[in-house]
Image: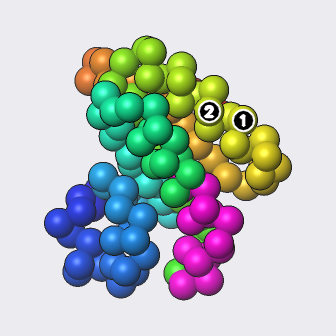
Amino acid sequence: MYLKSDYRDMPFAELLNDLSPHAFIEQNSSDETKYCFLEILANLPEERLRQRIKKYLRFFQENIWEAETGKPFPTVLIICPNNEKFNYVKSYAKSKMRELDEPSLTVRLSTADKVKGFGIGGDVWVTL
């Protein structure tokens, strides 16, 4: 896992700085490497939450990640501060993703309490 302070030393630092996820996760296994952007949402006004979601969707649509890295677009993991924000983000992100009609984008949501209780690798994620 790489945090924002680590981005400057990475090969695709400019891309990560542009998107500015809270963390970038690289999962290595014997047969493949998977990547994730981790976004931790604070208890922000709904407009700010929408802006964050839109930024990820624009970044995906522009195909810059794939062109610059030669890797598939990472899964987007979003941790919401509470159930109310979780439900709002889920509804908003789903509607925006339907407009995109792009099955290769994977977005997963959870709440801070679930991640605290079961860990980021636990069965805490809802896939949109």
Mark 1 is surrounded, within 10 Å at the Cα level, by few (under 14), some (14 to 19) or many (20 or more) other residues, namely few
Q: Which mark is residue 35?
A: none
Quadrant of res 48 = top left
Query: What segment carries the magenta color?
Result: 56-68
* Callouts 2 and 1 close, C-beta under 8 Å: yes
Image position of 16 with respect to 127: above or below: below
Left or right position of 100 against 118: right
Mark 2 is surrounded, within 10 Å at the Cα level, by few (under 14), some (14 to 19) or many (20 or more) other residues, namely some
Amino acid at the residue labelled 1: Ser
Visible residue check, residue 122: no
Quadrant of res 7 = bottom left
Left or right position of 68 against 17: right
Q: Which mark is residue 92?
A: 2
- The secondary structure that most of the magenta stretch takes on is helix
- Residue at 53 percent across and 30 percent down: it is 89
Query: Which x, y percent locates residue 33?
Result: 51, 63
Amino acid at the residue labelled 2: Tyr
Query: Which x, y percent locates residue 95?
Result: 72, 35
To which residue does mark 1 refer? 95
Q: Residue furthest top?
A: 83
